Image (spheres, rainbow, N blue to C red):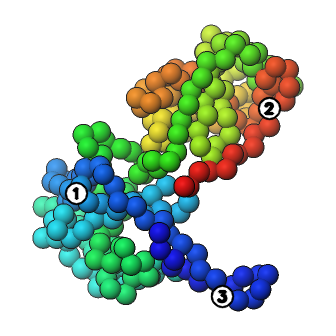
């Protein structure tokens, strides 16, 4: 772990330093654009640019540098320093500024001489032979899915829209516990399909519903994963809710995020 960002301690008024977490990855990581491998490495670094998930950094020997051209510009990070922006080109396909190179002036010693690629600018990413989506998965994030026979009731505006004694609890690091209920235990007549969808690297792609109670439409408060990822198969086809009143054992369930484990 390397200290990189300075600030002022409000208690003492003295300078303090914050840190960026850097760890080597044992996975083979591959990045594709236009059907070509742009980077392939078993020596990539996982760099926590934010506390929520890491980003992969690659040594130049594992990057197709012939596919990269410097943009002549830099992007500044107060924690990592200046990165030199590069466009990635494969045939007629290009991703402007999608690669960043950190040279000797980088604030984090471990990333000096490494490339970073914008996740969404590339066509696909693989850890070993499994494709990953949305962003790099945090190895310290854990998902548990537990069946529960405790009575779970969902209310919107005082109206019960779902009730079950065969829900599944999804416990994810740093996220409030979510209760997923069978559709047969949900008032589907009150749900209206939405065009909204979201992606999660741990669960997959979610489809949403809005809930109409009386004359009020509560937008995008229910969702489901039709084809979740392997580790989340137990919630396939079930429906969860948020911004609603959730009662477990007759007691209102507080949606309080748990601390995210970073070490």
Residue in view at x 75 percent, y 19 percent: 152
Give the quarter of the image for residue 9: bottom right
Give the quarter of the image for residue 132: top left
Residue closer to the observer: 106 or 243: 106
In the rendering, at what x and y percent does residue 106 appear?
Answer: 39, 82
Instruction: Tell me the crowding category of disc 1: few under 14, some 14 to 19, or many 20 or more residues within 10 angstroms, Cα based.
Output: many
In the rendering, at what x and y percent does residue 151 appear?
Answer: 76, 15
Question: Label 3, on which residue?
Answer: 15
Q: Residue 43 vs residue 194: left or right?
A: left
Residue 158, visible in the rendered structure? yes
Residue 214, visible in the rendered structure? no
**In the structure shown, which secondary structural element does the residue marked by tag 3 occupy?**
strand
In the rendering, at what x and y percent does residue 143 appear?
Answer: 53, 35
Question: Label 2, on which residue?
Answer: 253
Position of the C terminus by quadrant: bottom right
Residue in view at x 47 percent, y 50 percent: 138
Residue in view at x 12 percent, y 61 percent: 91
Please identify, in this view, whether the residue under mark 2 or under mark 3 is nearer the observer. Answer: 3
Question: Label 1, on which residue?
Answer: 41
């Amino acid at each position: 772990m390397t200290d990189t960002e300075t600030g002022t301690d409000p208690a003492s008024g003295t300078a303090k330093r914050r840190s960026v977490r850097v760890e080597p990855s044992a996975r083979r990581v591959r990045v594709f654009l236009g059907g070509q491998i742009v980077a392939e490495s078993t020596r990539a670094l996982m760099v926590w640019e934010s506390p929520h998930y890491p980003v992969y950094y690659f040594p130049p020997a594992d990057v197709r540098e012939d596919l990269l051209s410097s943009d002549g510009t830099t992007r500044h990070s107060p924690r990592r320093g200046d990165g030199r922006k590069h466009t990635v080109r494969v045939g007629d396909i290009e991703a402007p500024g999608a690669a960043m190179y950190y040279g000797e002036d980088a604030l984090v010693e471990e990333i000096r001489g490494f490339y970073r690629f914008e996740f969404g600018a590339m066509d696909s990413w693989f850890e070993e032979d499994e494709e990953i989506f949305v962003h790099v998965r945090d190895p310290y994030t854990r998902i548990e899915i537990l069946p529960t026979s405790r009575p779970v009731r969902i209310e919107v505006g005082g109206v019960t829209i779902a009730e079950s004694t065969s829900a599944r609890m999804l416990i994810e690091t740093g996220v409030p516990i979510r209760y997923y209920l069978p559709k047969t235990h949900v008032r589907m007549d009150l749900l209206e399909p939405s065009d909204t969808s979201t992606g999660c690297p741990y669960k997959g792609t979610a489809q949403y519903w809005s809930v109409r109670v009386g004359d009020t439409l509560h937008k995008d408060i229910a969702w489901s994963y039709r084809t979740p990822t392997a580790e989340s198969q137990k919630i396939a086809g079930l429906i969860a809710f948020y911004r609603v009143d959730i009662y477990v054992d007759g007691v209102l369930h507080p949606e309080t995020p748990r601390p995210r484990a970073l070490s």
